[in-house]
Image (cartoon, helix red, strand yellow):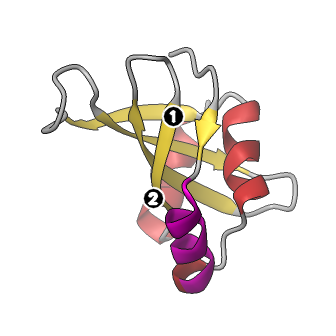
């Protein structure tokens, strides 16, 4: 999947920092390092703009999962980001190899 640009709206940036202590540069880092991308569900607002998750370990060693809408413009509109839980980390370890 091609991602032209990562878009993080101000309110989303504030929410992911407040709730999950994830910074915007960490979210962008996930997309720069060829993440594992997984389809989550079909879009409800615009057909073809579906929900995905991107999974990746950051340079600092954090295992992050980022939820985003893949827009028609090839942009990733970020909805949320957080640390992977134990089960997700095991899944990610299997998928990356």
Question: Does the CB distance between marks 2 and 1 fall below 8 Å?
Answer: no
- Of the residues under marks 2 and 1, which one precedes in the sequence? 1
Q: Answer left or right for 69 relative to 2.
A: left
Q: Is residue 75 left or right of residue 28?
A: left
Q: Which mark is residue 88?
A: 2
Task: Inspect the magenta stretch and tell me whether residue 16 lies in it.
Answer: yes
Separation of marks 2 and 1 at Cα, in angstroms: 21 Å
- Across and down, in percent, residue 10 comes to 58, 63
Q: Between 71 and 85, which is closer to the camera in this rendering?
A: 71
The x and y percentages for residue 90 are 50, 56
6, 64: nearer the viewer? 6
Q: Which residues are magenta?
A: 9-18
Judging from the image, what secondary structure is the residue with disc 2 in? Answer: helix
Quick one: label 2, few (<14), some, or many (20+) residues within 10 Å?
some
Residue under numbered circle 1: 76
Query: In the image, what residue occupies the spot 56% across and 15% down?
Result: 2
Camera sees residue 3: yes
């Amino acid at each position: 999947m091609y991602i032209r640009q990562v878009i993080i709206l101000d309110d989303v940036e504030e929410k992911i920092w407040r709730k999950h202590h994830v910074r915007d540069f960490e979210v962008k880092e996930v997309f720069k390092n060829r993440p594992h991308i997984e389809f989550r569900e079909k879009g409800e607002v615009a057909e073809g703009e579906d929900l995905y998750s991107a999974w990746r370990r950051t340079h600092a060693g954090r295992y992050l999962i980022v939820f985003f809408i893949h827009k028609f413009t090839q942009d990733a509109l970020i909805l949320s980001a957080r640390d992977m839980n134990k089960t997700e980390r095991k899944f990610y370890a299997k998928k990356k190899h």
